[in-house]
Amino acid sequence: MPKVSEAHLAARRRQILDAAAACFARDGFHRTSMQDIVRASGISAGLVYRYFAGKDDMIAAIVTEWHDQRQVFATGTVGERAAAYLDYLREVGRAETAERNRLGVQIWAEAVRNERIRDLSRRNVDDPRAAVAQALGRADADGLARVLIAIYQGLVLQTTWDETLDNEAYVRAVEGLISALTRP
């Protein structure tokens, strides 16, 4: 049997995860069946199961990828981190992130009932929180970092519920808060 390249394996895995994410965002985790994911991916069920034992493994892979993408907050000056955060908030309001926002809300809900997903999701809170708290270097830094995370989570939730939300006005308000917090 011929060997398959790592790039091919990665592309297949990506194809499955993209299909799963689209199904999860549309129908939620519990209403999405493995057959839905197989159909959306265009890959045979046997091949899908070679990559993932089930939906929980797919959800965990998605959450892990999100964590890896958020490492942008781990380095840089306070100003650079603030700019990256504001860009991240702006991204929430883009039409092309609507599916991702819905998926994020689904993941947060799943984290309430699934310990594995909660542990992975906590990394998406705890690591950026620690990085921001360290960068702020204030006695109340952990609390402020949690507030900034809650602002992001609130924006995602509000954007998912309310298509009339003015994302840019929201980001400008947050920018004013950050400016006040980081003044010497």
Image (cartoon, grey):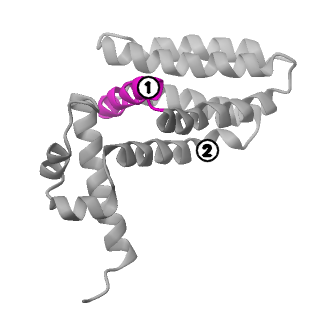
Q: Residues within 10 Å of mark 2 (few under 14, many from 20)?
A: few
- Which of discs 2 and 1 lies nearer the camera? The answer is 1
Dot label at residue 113: 1
Q: Residue at x 50, y 39 (%)?
A: 116
Q: Residue at x 17, y 52 (%)?
A: 38
- Location of residue 119 by image quarter: top right
Q: Is residue 104 magenta?
A: yes
**Residue type beneath disc 1:** Arg
In percent of width and height, residue 56 lies at: 37, 43
Tag count: 2
Tell me the CA gap for discs 2 and 1.
Answer: 26 Å
In percent of width and height, residue 15 lies at: 27, 56
Position of the C terminus, as image quadrant, is top right
Where is mark 2, residue-wise? 71
**Residue type beneath disc 2:** Gln
Q: Is residue 44 above or below residue 128?
A: below
Label pair 2/1, CB-CB below 8 angstroms = no
Position of the N terminus, as image quadrant, is bottom left
Judging depth in this view, the residue of 34 and 170 nearest the camera is 34
In percent of width and height, residue 136 lies at: 80, 26
Dot label at residue 34: none
Judging depth in this view, the residue of 43 and 87 nearest the camera is 43
Q: Secondary structure at mark 2?
A: helix
Judging depth in this view, the residue of 29 and 41 nearest the camera is 29
Is residue 168 shown left or right of residue 138?
left
In percent of width and height, residue 31 lies at: 20, 30
- Magenta part of the chain: 95-114
Q: Residue at x 69, y 22 (%)?
A: 145
